């Protein structure tokens, strides 16, 4: 941990954002953490908080199953995404379905290739058999009833992912925005203040997001802040994530342990500055 963030974290008197995320992993046992970490159950929470607005904000779920062999892969309109509800980095993007039963698909770790139905089911079973959160002490993941589900793949004309706005909230107050753009060189990242202005901060190893890539995000930022404030009001700290699409923003997830408390921030003093917004009980 010290090697990742550049110092030995003090969990008895946490001050930086990384130290306080680590503190939260150890001490916070609110059942709402588990509910809002579950990628299926969080949808109910969004409806409770936002009411009718949630209908437009939530990406439709096409199917939810406990047994991956029950997934109706031949019946879902392409493109779609297969996900696990209890984990991170468990996304299988399906771009094309061939009449012979093969699928053109990719994951976060594998480039596009042909997958059989059985290979997709095997991948899902591997996800379900892995206890996400255990090795990193991310308590909120451990109590989730494991399932896999399918939702439409929100993609641009080139089948790329839309920009993302990840809003850091402290005690229900949106304070920072992590802007992410997906382009030919990979993922670009920039940290903005709550008004959408750039901060003098780098997110290594990623290049910064260009001003052109920030246009749509900034156009929706007032609305996104309002949604994030409602969705974060039950927590001392969380990050509320959205996709920014031409049809308007779409909810992605609520994240309680960004980078598991090992986020590299340049300059490093911003680690402390972010932490000042989060008031936790003193040990």
Image (cartoon, rainbow, N blue to C red):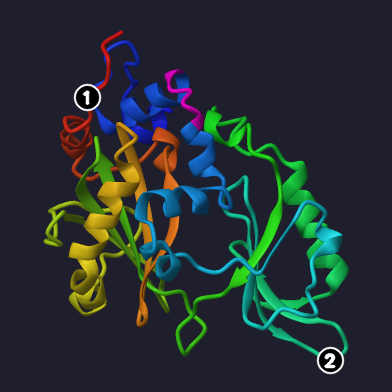
Q: Compared to 26, does 145 lie above or below?
A: below
Residue numbers of the magenta segment: 27-31
The one nearer the camera, 60 or 106, is 60
The tag on residue 207 is none
The tag on residue 99 is 2
Q: Compared to 188, does 2 lie above or below?
A: above
Mark 1 Cα shell of 10 Å, populated few (<14), some (14-19), many (≥20): some
Task: Assign a secondary structure to mark 2.
Answer: loop
Q: Compared to 130, does 207 lie above or below?
A: below
Mark 2 Cα shell of 10 Å, populated few (<14), some (14-19), many (≥20): few
For marks 2 and 1, give the CA distance.
57 Å
Judging by the rendered image, the residue that carries numbered circle 1 is 279
Q: Compared to 71, does 22 lie above or below?
A: above
Residue at image location 32% in from the left, 43% down from the top: 232
Q: Residue furthest top?
A: 283
Examine the image and state in which quarter residue 18 appears. top left
User: Magenta part mainly helix, strand or loop?
Assistant: loop
Residue at image location 80% in from the left, 79% down from the top: 74
Magenta stretch containing residue 28, yes or no? yes
Answer with left or right where residue 189 lies relative to residue 146: left
């Amino acid at each position: 941990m010290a090697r990742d963030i550049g110092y030995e974290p003090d969990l008895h008197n946490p001050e930086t954002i990384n130290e306080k995320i680590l503190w939260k992993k150890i001490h916070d046992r609110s059942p709402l953490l588990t509910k809002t970490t579950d990628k299926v159950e969080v949808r109910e929470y969004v409806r409770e908080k936002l009411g009718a607005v949630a209908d437009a904000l939530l990406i439709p779920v096409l199917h939810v199953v406990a047994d991956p062999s029950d997934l109706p892969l031949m019946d879902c309109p392409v493109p779609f995404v297969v996900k696990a509800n209890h984990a991170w980095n468990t996304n299988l993007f399906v771009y094309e379905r061939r009449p012979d039963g093969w699928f053109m698909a990719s994951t976060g770790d594998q480039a596009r290739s042909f997958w059989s139905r059985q290979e997709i089911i095997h991948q899902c079973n591997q996800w379900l058999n892995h206890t996400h959160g255990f090795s990193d002490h991310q308590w909120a993941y451990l109590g989730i009833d494991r399932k896999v589900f399918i939702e439409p793949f929100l993609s641009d004309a080139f089948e790329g992912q839309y920009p993302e706005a990840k809003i850091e909230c402290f005690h229900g107050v949106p304070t920072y925005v992590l802007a992410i753009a997906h382009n030919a060189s990979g993922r670009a990242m920039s940290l903005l203040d709550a008004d959408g202005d750039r901060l003098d901060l780098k997110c290594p190893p990623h290049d910064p997001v260009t001003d052109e890539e920030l246009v749509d995000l900034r156009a929706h930022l007032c609305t996104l802040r309002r949604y994030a404030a409602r969705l974060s009001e039950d927590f001392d700290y969380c990050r509320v994530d959205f996709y920014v699409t031409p049809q308007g923003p779409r909810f992605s997830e609520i994240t309680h342990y960004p980078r598991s408390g090992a986020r590299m921030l340049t300059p490093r003093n911003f680690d402390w500055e972010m932490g000042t917004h989060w008031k936790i009980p003193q040990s």
